[in-house]
Image: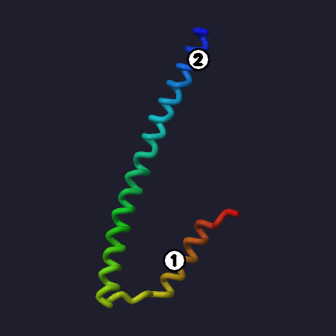
Amino acid sequence: MGSANGAALKNSQATAGEEVADAANLSPLSRLAQQTTASDQQRVESLRKQFQSGQYVPDSLKTSAKMVAENLSNPLKP
């Protein structure tokens, strides 16, 4: 019974170590996601102000090219 408890303790320690490693690996990704969100919010706010003031002029060619590029780089998986 003692060896079973020892094995369980070793497994829990390995899992805790893996969680720390995962957290360390996700930290830069998390920071990038937060930065992207902040910059997206600023860009959306800028576009909102342009639209409300009547200064926004959509560029359909640029929009469609971006849509095609995004779909080609990230195809939907069935």
The answer to whether 20 is drawn above or below residue 63 in the figure is above
Compared across the picture, whether 5 is left or right of 56 comes to right
Q: Quadrant of residue 77?
A: bottom right
Quadrant of the frame with the N terminus? top right
Nearest the viewer among 7 and 75 is 7
Three-letter amino acid code at the position of disc 2: Ala
Residue 41: give x, y in percent of width and height: 35, 68
Labels 1 and 2 touching (C-beta < 8 A): no
* Residue position marked by numbered label 2 in the rendering: 7
Where disc 2 sits, the SS reads: helix
| Res. 76 image quadrant | bottom right
Q: Which mark is residue 39?
A: none
Q: Earlier in the sequence, mark 1 or mark 2?
A: 2
Measured along the vertical axis of the image, is residue 72 above or below residue 26? below
Find numbered disc 1 in the image and state the secondary structure of the residue it sits on. helix
Residue at left offset 61%, top offset 71%: 72
Q: Give above or below for 7 relative to 15.
A: above
> What percent of the width, then of the height, locates residue 52?
31, 85
Q: Nearer the viewer, residue 37 or 63?
A: 37
